[in-house]
Image (cartoon, rainbow, N blue to C red):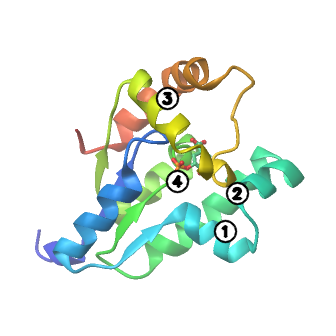
């Protein structure tokens, strides 16, 4: 509270919940820099997220994600950070995100997330399938695994 403007703002939540959209609006209103960890991973690796998944598998993508989040939270202070939907899976990311700032979990019903992801299929480069279940069943399954992690990381959920 002594330096409220230096506290970061982090958005977490499932794919399609609106982290990047909300993050851009909030950062513009507050005049703070905005970072999207998926965009940074693609820039740093020189590849799309789908290519990293396809060529090296999900664990290698999670390594990129961990390194990228570590870099983003060390500089600059006060930024708005939108994370990938699975960033909260690793404990080290959860703890870095919490140390960085105020964490908001953006929630939406699985049916709404599925509707948005299917409407946004052009983003398959950043959203390779996580399971072989199909959109709605995958969301229900993965969300059930992650809900407690989103909950424990967040200061508030909306
Ligand atoms: C993932 C979500 C994606 C991206 C990657 C993995 C996940 O981010 O990081 O495809 O595991 O939920 P968005 O939530 O920005 O789509």
Pick whichever of labels 1 and 3 is earlier in the sequence: 1
Q: Residue 114 carries which label?
A: 3
Horizontal side of 83 relative to 38 (left or right) equals left
Pick whichever of labels 2 and 3 is earlier in the sequence: 2
What x and y, as percent, mark residue 21? 35, 57
Instruction: In the rendered view, tell whether residue 44 sits above or below residue 97.
Output: below
- Secondary-structure class at tag 2: helix
Q: In which quarter of the image is residue 90?
A: top right
Q: How far apart are marks 4 and 2 (CA)?
A: 18 Å
Q: How far apart are marks 1 and 3 (CA)?
A: 24 Å
What x and y, as percent, mark residue 69? 54, 65
Q: Name the residue that disc number 1 marks.
A: 42
Pick whichever of labels 2 and 1 is earlier in the sequence: 1
- Secondary-structure class at tag 4: helix
Pick whichever of labels 4 and 1 is earlier in the sequence: 1
Q: Name the residue that disc number 2 marks.
A: 49
Q: How far apart are marks 2 and 1 (CA)?
A: 6 Å
Instruction: In the rendered view, tell whether residue 140 sits above or below residue 150.
Output: above
Q: Distance between the residues labelled 2 and 3?
A: 20 Å
Q: Nearer the viewer, mark 2 or mark 3?
A: 3
Q: Is mark 2 within 8 Å of ligand 1?
A: yes
Pick whichever of labels 3 and 4 is earlier in the sequence: 4
Q: Quadrant of residue 157?
A: top left
Disc 4: CA contacts within 10 A as few (<14), some (14-19) or many (>=20): many
Q: Which mark is residue 93?
A: 4
């Amino acid at each position: 509270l002594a330096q409220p403007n230096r506290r970061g703002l982090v958005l977490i939540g499932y794919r399609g919940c609106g982290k990047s959209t909300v993050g851009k609006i909030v950062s513009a209103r507050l005049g703070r820099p905005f970072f999207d960890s998926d965009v940074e991973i693609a820039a740093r690796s020189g590849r799309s997220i789908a290519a990293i998944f396809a060529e090296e598998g999900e664990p290698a993508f999670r390594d990129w994600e961990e390194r990228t989040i570590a870099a983003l939270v060390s500089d600059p202070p006060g930024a708005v950070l939108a994370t990938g939907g699975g960033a909260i899976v690793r404990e080290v990311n959860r703890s870095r995100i919490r140390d960085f700032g105020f964490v908001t979990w953006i929630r939406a019903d699985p049916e709404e997330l599925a509707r948005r992801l299917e409407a946004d299929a052009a983003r398959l480069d950043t959203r390779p399938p996580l399971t072989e279940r199909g959109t709605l069943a995958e969301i229900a399954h993965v969300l059930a695994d992650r809900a407690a992690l989103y909950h424990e990381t967040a200061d508030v959920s909306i």
